[in-house]
Image (cartoon, helix red, strand yellow):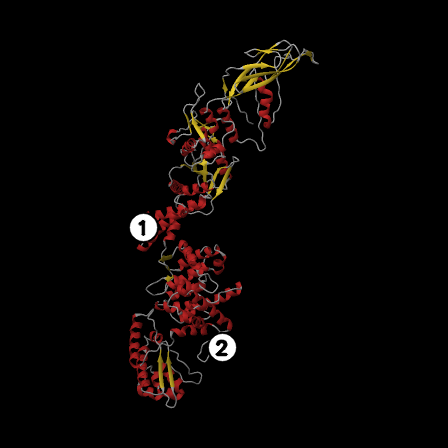
C-alpha cells in the first residue's frame, strides 16, 4: 500500500515487477515498467525483456510466493502476480543470461481452499516451464544445521564448505565409531557401521541417530519443517546441553536423542509445534521428565551408580519418545534403535535392557510389544494397575498371601504341616516331625517371633511339651515384599475381571501375561521370603538356619528343599543303624522300652529327627537278626522274657512301639540263652567278731556268670578255727585269734574272716564287738564320681541283713540353670525306674 522508496532518492515501487526491475537495472530499468507498477498491472513479455540486462547475467530469486498471493488476493495483485510470473518465466526461458528461481511451500499445511487452488495453479505453471530442484540433500542437512547453530572459525571450513573438526572432536568420533563396530550385531542394520567414523564426523557435535530421526521418521509429519523445525528444536537443545554441561562440569560426548531437555517448557512447546499435537504432554510429565515424581527420574535416583550417573532411564525413555513420534506407519522404537541412540564408549549395553524392563513395569503411557516400544496418548495397563492397587483391601492381601504360602508348602507328602499357629495347643505334641509355617508377619528378626517359638517349644496348652525336638519352624524374612506381590496380583486380577472388555487386543494379551507374571512373582516371593528355618539345638535353645537366596528352581517343592538341607546337616535322618542305638544307650537302663526309644528321637535334641518313625522298626529288626540287640516282652514269673527274639529273623511289621516291649543289649540277651553256671558264692556277713565259744550265723547264696542268684547244691562249710555246721552256724573257738570261714560248692569258693576275742570296753563305755546302737544314720554329701564306691564300701554289707533304708535328696544347680527340657527328661527317667516323688524347681 505504501510502497518502497520514494523518499530516499529512489523511485516509489508498489509491485514485485517494479522492485525486480529497479534491482536489475536501477531507474532506467524501472522506467520500463513504471506505468505497470503504478496501475498494479503485470507487464507482458516485451516490457519484461526490455527491463532485463543485456550485458551481464541476472539471477532472480522469488521466495514465499504463496504468502504474497494469500495477502493480496482481495486487492487483485495475486492474479496479476500469476500473470507476471508466467510472462517472466516464459521470457527467462528464452534468455541465455537469465535464471529465475521461485520457491513455493513443500507442505500444504494450514492452507485454505483458495490457497490450495492458487498453490496448484502456480505449481503447474512453474513445472511446465521450469524444473524442480531440492536445495539441500539429506547428506547436507547435518552440515547446514551445525553451520547455523554454532559459530565456527572461518579457517576451520574446508573448500567443500564443511567444518574441519578439532582433534578432541575427531577422537570422540573415533571412540563412538569403535563402540558401534564392537556391537554391530546389536544396533540397526541400516546404520553404515563400516563408515561409522565418517557418519559421526559429519554429524558432530550431534549423534547421527538424533539428526537421522527427523529424516527417517519426522519428515512425513504434516507440520514438520525439516530444516527450520529441526533448527528450532536443536537451538533449545544445544543451549540446554551447554548450560547443563557447564553447571555439572560433565557432559556427554555427543548431543544424543536421550539428552533432549523435555523438562524445559520452551523446548516442549517447540516439540508440540512440530508434532502438531500436545496430547503426549501428560505422558512426558508422568513417565519421563518434568516432575520430581516422573517415573524415569525416580528410577534413575534409585538405580546403581552406572545407570544413575548416566540418567539412563530418562535417556532411554526420551529416545523412545522421539523414535516413536514420527509420522511413519510403524510408530515405535526398536531395541536396536534405542541401543544406538543412548549407547556410547563408556556405556554398558546390557543396562539398556535392564532399564527397559524397569520402565515397562512402571510407566503409565509406555506400550511394548516384541522388543518394540512407543509412548501413547492413552494410559496403559500400568496406569490401570496403579489406580486399582490403591483399592485393594489389606484383608484380601493377607488372605491371598497366606493362600499362596499354603500352596507352596503343601506340595510334599509325609510331613505334617501346621500353618500360622497363634496358640501353643494348635501345634500337636506327637513323636513325628512337624513343620510349623509361621505367619509372614512374624519376621525372623522380630523378638516376638522368638518368644512365641520358645513358648510353643515349652508348652502344649496347659501342659509341658514332650516332643520338643520334633518341631521345625519355617520363618519369613519380612512380609513387605510378599504383601506387595499379593497386592499386585489381586490388582491385575481385578482389571482382568472388570476391564478386559474395554482393552484392545494387544492390551488384553499383555494383561494375561501380567497376571501370569504376577502369579510367578508371588510364588517366588514366598520362596525368597521363607529362607529361615528354626529348630531345637543340642543346648536346648532354638537355632536358626539362613538358607540364603533361594528360588523355585532349587527344588521340586519348598518342603523338599528344607529337608534336603536338614539331611545334609544330619538334623534329619531317614533311619539309623543298630550300632547307633548301642552308642546312645541310656546308662541307667537295662531294658529300653520301644516307645521310649522312638520318643527319644523327637524329645531329645541329642538325637537326630527321624523323617519316617516307622523305619525305626527296620533298625530294630536288623539289630535282632545281626545279634546286636534283642526284642523282648515283659519278664514272666520265672524270670524269662516273653516274647524273646534274638539272633533270629524278625519282620518290622511284627515290632510295636509300646511301654510293654523292650530292646536289650546282646550281653543281656545272652544271659537268657546260655545255661546258668555257678561262678561265685556270696557270704554274709563278709567279716565278723565273736567272743570265744559264742555262736554266729553265716548265710550264703550262689551267683551265676550273669550275676543272677541260683540255688546252692552240696554247700560245704569249713572253718580254720571253731566249728561250723551245715547250715552256717558257727561256734567260735575258745582261743582268741583270727580265723577263716569258707563256703564251697563245686568249683566256687568264698572265704570270710572271723575275729575271736575277749570282750573289751571302748572309751565310751560300750562293749567292743557288741551291738552298741539299734540304728545307724549318716548324712553327708557324696560326690557323683563316688556313688558306686559308696554303695559297695558302705551299703552293700547291710543289703542282706534287712532294715536298710536309703533316702536320697538330690540338688541340681548347674551354671546357666536347668532347662525345661532337662527337667522333663528327669521326670521321665524317674517314671521309667518306678520311682515316685515330686521334682521341685525354682
Q: Which quadrant of the view contains residue 614?
A: top left
In this view of the protein, can residue 641 be seen by the observer?
yes
Mark 1, mark 2: which one is toward the viewer? 2
Q: Does residue 101 appear left or right of residue 819 in this picture?
A: left
Mark sitting on residue 373: none
Please tell me how crowded label 2 is: few (under 14), some (14-19), or many (20+) other residues with Cα within 10 Å: few
Query: SS at mark 1?
Result: helix
Report the front residue among 96 and 174: 174
Quarter of the image containing the C terminus? top right
Nearer to us in this view, 121 or 84: 121
Of the 4 image quadrants, the one containing the N terminus is bottom left
Circle 1 residue: 500
- Describe residue 706's horizontal placement relative to residue 724 as left or right: left
Farthest residue, direction right: 763
Of the numbered discs in the image, which one, if any, rests on residue 156?
Answer: 2
Comes first in the chain, label 1 or label 2:
2
Can see residue 289?
Answer: no
Amino acid at each position: 500500500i505504501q510502497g518502497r522508496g520514494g523518499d530516499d532518492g529512489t523511485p516509489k515501487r508498489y509491485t514485485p515487477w517494479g522492485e525486480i526491475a529497479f534491482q536489475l537495472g536501477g531507474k532506467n530499468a524501472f522506467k520500463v515498467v513504471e506505468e505497470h507498477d503504478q496501475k498494479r498491472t503485470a507487464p507482458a513479455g516485451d516490457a519484461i525483456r526490455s527491463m532485463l540486462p543485456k550485458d551481464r547475467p541476472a539471477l532472480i530469486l522469488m521466495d514465499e510466493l504463496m504468502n504474497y498471493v494469500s495477502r493480496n488476493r482481495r486487492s487483485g495483485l495475486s492474479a496479476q502476480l500469476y500473470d507476471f510470473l508466467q510472462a517472466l518465466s516464459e521470457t527467462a526461458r528464452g534468455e541465455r543470461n537469465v535464471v529465475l528461481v521461485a520457491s513455493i511451500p513443500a507442505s500444504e499445511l494450514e492452507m485454505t481452499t483458495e490457497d490450495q487452488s492458487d498453490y496448484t495453479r502456480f505449481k503447474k505453471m512453474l513445472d511446465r516451464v521450469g524444473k524442480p530442484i531440492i536445495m539441500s540433500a539429506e547428506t547436507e542437512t547435518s552440515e547446514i544445521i551445525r553451520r547455523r547453530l554454532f559459530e565456527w572459525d572461518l579457517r576451520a571450513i574446508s573448500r567443500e564448505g564443511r567444518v574441519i573438526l578439532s582433534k578432541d572432536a575427531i577422537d570422540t568420533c573415533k571412540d563412538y565409531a569403535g563402540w558401534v563396530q564392537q556391537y554391530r550385531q546389536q544396533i540397526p542394520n541400516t546404520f553404515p557401521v563400516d563408515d561409522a567414523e565418517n557418519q559421526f564426523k559429519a554429524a558432530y557435535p550431534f549423534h547421527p541417530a538424533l539428526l537421522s530421526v527427523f529424516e527417517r521418521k519426522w519428515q512425513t509429519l504434516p507440520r514438520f519443517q525439516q530444516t527450520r523445525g529441526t533448527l528450532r528444536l536443536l537451538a533449545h537443545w544445544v543451549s540446554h546441553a551447554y548450560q547443563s554441561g557447564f553447571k555439572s562440569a560433565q557432559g556427554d560426548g555427543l548431543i544424543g536423542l536421550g539428552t533432549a531437555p523435555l523438562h524445559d517448557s520452551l523446548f516442549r512447546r517447540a516439540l508440540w509445534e512440530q508434532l502438531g499435537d500436545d496430547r503426549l504432554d501428560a505422558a512426558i510429565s508422568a513417565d519421563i521428565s518434568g516432575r520430581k515424581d516422573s517415573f524415569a527420574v525416580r528410577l534413575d535416583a534409585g538405580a546403581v551408580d552406572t545407570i544413575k550417573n548416566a540418567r539412563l532411564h530418562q535417556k532411554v525413555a526420551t529416545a523412545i519418545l522421539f523414535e516413536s513420534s514420527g509420522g511413519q506407519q510403524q510408530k515405535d522404537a526398536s531395541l536396536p534403535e534405542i541401543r544406538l541412540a543412548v549407547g556410547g564408549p563408556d556405556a554398558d549395553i546390557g543396562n539398556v535392557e535392564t532399564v527397559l524392563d524397569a520402565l515397562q513395569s512402571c510407566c503409565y503411557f509406555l506400550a511394548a510389544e516384541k522388543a518394540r516400544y512407543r509412548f501413547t496418548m492413552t494410559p496403559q495397563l500400568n496406569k490401570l494397575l496403579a489406580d486399582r492397587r490403591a483399592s485393594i483391601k489389606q484383608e484380601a492381601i493377607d488372605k491371598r498371601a497366606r493362600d499362596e504360602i499354603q500352596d507352596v508348602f503343601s506340595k510334599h507328602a509325609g510331613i505334617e504341616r501346621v500353618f500360622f499357629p497363634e496358640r501353643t495347643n494348635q501345634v500337636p505334641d506327637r513323636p513325628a516331625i512337624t513343620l510349623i509355617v509361621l505367619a509372614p508377619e512374624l519376621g525372623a528378626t522380630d523378638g516376638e517371633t522368638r518368644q512365641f517359638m520358645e513358648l510353643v517349644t515349652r508348652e502344649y496348652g496347659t501342659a509341658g511339651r514332650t516332643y520338643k525336638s520334633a518341631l521345625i519352624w519355617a520363618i519369613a524374612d519380612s512380609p513387605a515384599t510378599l504383601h506387595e506381590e499379593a497386592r499386585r496380583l489381586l490388582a491385575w486380577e481385578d482389571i482382568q475381571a472388570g476391564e478386559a472388555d474395554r482393552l484392545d487386543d494387544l492390551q488384553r494379551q499383555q494383561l494375561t501375561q501380567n497376571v501370569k507374571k504376577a502369579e510367578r512373582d508371588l510364588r517366588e516371593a514366598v520362596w525368597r521370603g521363607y529362607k529361615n528355618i528354626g529348630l531345637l539345638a543340642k543346648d536346648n535353645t532354638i537355632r536358626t538356619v539362613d538358607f540364603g537366596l533361594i528360588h523355585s528352581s532349587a527344588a521340586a517343592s519348598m518342603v523338599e528343599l528344607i529337608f534336603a538341607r536338614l539331611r545334609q546337616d544330619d538334623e534329619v535322618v531317614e533311619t539309623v543303624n543298630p550300632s547307633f542305638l548301642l552308642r546312645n544307650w541310656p546308662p541307667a537302663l537295662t531294658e529300653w522300652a520301644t516307645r521310649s526309644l522312638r520318643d527319644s528321637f523327637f524329645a531329645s535334641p541329642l538325637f537326630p529327627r527321624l523323617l519316617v518313625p516307622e523305619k525305626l522298626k527296620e533298625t530294630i529288626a536288623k539289630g535282632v537278626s545281626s545279634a546286636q540287640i534283642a526284642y523282648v516282652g515283659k519278664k514272666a514269673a520265672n524270670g524269662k522274657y516273653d516274647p524273646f527274639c534274638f539272633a533270629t529273623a524278625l519282620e518290622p511289621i511284627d515290632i510295636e512301639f509300646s511301654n510293654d516291649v523292650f530292646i536289650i543289649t546282646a550281653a543281656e540277651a545272652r544271659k537268657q540263652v546260655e545255661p546258668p553256671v555257678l561262678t561265685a558264692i556270696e557270704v554274709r556277713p563278709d567279716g565278723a567278731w565273736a567272743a570265744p565259744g559264742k555262736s554266729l550265723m553265716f548265710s550264703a547264696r550262689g551267683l551265676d556268670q550273669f550275676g543272677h542268684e541260683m540255688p546252692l547244691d552240696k554247700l560245704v562249710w569249713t572253718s580254720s578255727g571253731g566249728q561250723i555246721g551245715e547250715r552256717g552256724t558257727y561256734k567260735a573257738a575258745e582261743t582268741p585269734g583270727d580265723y577263716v570261714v569258707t563256703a564251697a560248692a563245686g568249683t566256687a569258693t568264698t572265704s570270710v574272716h572271723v575275729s575271736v576275742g575277749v570282750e573289751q570296753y571302748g572309751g565310751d563305755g560300750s562293749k567292743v564287738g557288741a551291738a552298741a546302737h539299734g540304728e545307724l544314720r549318716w548324712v553327708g554329701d557324696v560326690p557323683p564320681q563316688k556313688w558306686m564306691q559308696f554303695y559297695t564300701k558302705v551299703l552293700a554289707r547291710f543289703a542282706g541283713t534287712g532294715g536298710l533304708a536309703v533316702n536320697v535328696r538330690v540338688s541340681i544347680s548347674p551354671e546357666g540353670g536347668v532347662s525345661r527340657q532337662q527337667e522333663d527328661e528327669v521326670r521321665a527317667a524317674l517314671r521309667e525306674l518306678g520311682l515316685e516323688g515330686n521334682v521341685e524347681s525354682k
